[in-house]
Image (cartoon, grey):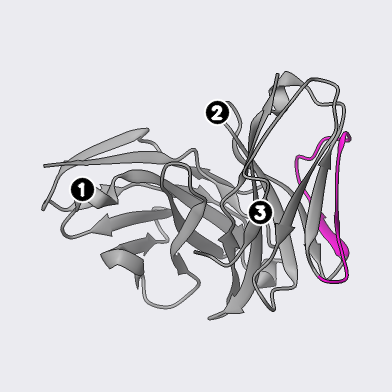
Amino acid sequence: DSGVTQTPKHLITATGQRVTLRCSPRSGDLSVYWYQQSLDQGLQFLIQYYNGEERAKGNILERFSAQQFPDLHSELNLSSLELGDSALYFCASSVWTSGTDTQYFGPGTRLTVL
Amino acid sequence: AQSVAQPEDQVNVAEGNPLTVKCTYSVSGNPYLFWYVQYPNRGLQFLLKYITGDNLVKGSYGFEAEFNKSQTSFHLKKPSALVSDSALYFCAVRPSILTGGGNKLTFGTGTQLKVEL
């Protein structure tokens, strides 16, 4: 168990809908990362937050947005969902050890868009 | 831009035999390299990382990895494979802090390891 929690585990919804994925980082970790894992794209970095501020952006669609709250939990909002958004969405939080930060991943949320 | 290649989609090995999962990378400056393992319906678990120093890095569950700068490789190894090691293995890279490339990890496509009796 990494200490990173994600809810819900599974989400089934229809095209055009909006969903919110939630992540709680490990105690004390200030950074939260979101990744998408799909069969055709592999594991792709979406976005990073550090202590409430957006720090880096990757291949995140404009229909997707995220935020990190004062208690450091984070939410990833996906809107106008398409079939191709079906994927596993991982959250990771990082701790600084031995000269760099190591990212620890949550169990993921499996999103199915029908 | 940074990238990682895992040339084998699947590696099969008999239990008790040594295993190697290959990884090559491309990054500006000195790399930070990581191996993660993913079991079915689970998240990624951190195995080990290379920052600097000794080219042989030891990690969890008896795994180790060898960093080779001239070949830009970071192969994962284990002297004696177990059936329970069967899983999906990911290599990842990020540039060093001095390069200023940010913290995002770039992952390879993954290698399915199958250890058979």
* Pointer 1 chain: B
Mark 3: few, some, or many residues within 10 Å (few <14, many ≥20)?
many
Judge if badges 3 and 2 mark residues of a common chain. Answer: yes
Q: What residue type is labelled 2?
A: Leu
Q: Are the residues at dot 2 and dot 1 in contact (C-beta closer than 8 Å)?
A: no
User: As drawn, is A50 to the left or to the right of A85?
Assistant: right
Which residue corresponds to mark 1? B83
| Distance from the alpha carbon under mark 2 to that under mark 1 | 25 Å
The reply to whether dot 3 and dot 2 touch (C-beta < 8 Å) is: no
Of A71 and A68, which appears nearest the observer? A71
Say which residue label 2 marks: A39
Name the residue type under label 1: Val
Residue at disc 2, secondary structure: loop
Percent position (x, y) of residue B40?
42, 42
Q: Place residue A95 in its image quadrant.
A: bottom right
Which of the pair B83/B100 is nearer the observer?
Answer: B83
Q: Give the range drawn in magenta.
A: A53-71
Kindly identify which chain the residue marked by label 2 belongs to: A
Q: Which chain carries label 3?
A: A
Comparing marks 1 and 3, which lies closer to the viewer?
Answer: 3
Q: Tell me if mark 2 has few (under 14), some (14-19) or many (20+) residues whose alpha carbon lies within 10 angstroms of its own.
A: few
Task: Indicate the quadrant containing the C terminus of chain A: top left, top right, bottom left or bottom right.
Answer: top right
The question of residue B15 being in magenta is answered with no
| SS class, disc 3 | strand
- What label sits on residue A6 in the rendered view? 3
Label 1 sits on a secondary structure element that is helix
List x then y, in percent, for residue B37: 42, 52
Q: Can residue A76 be seen in this view?
A: yes
- In the rendered image, residue A67, in percent from the top left (x then y), is placed at 86, 55
Which residue is found at the position 46% from the left and 68% from the top?
B50
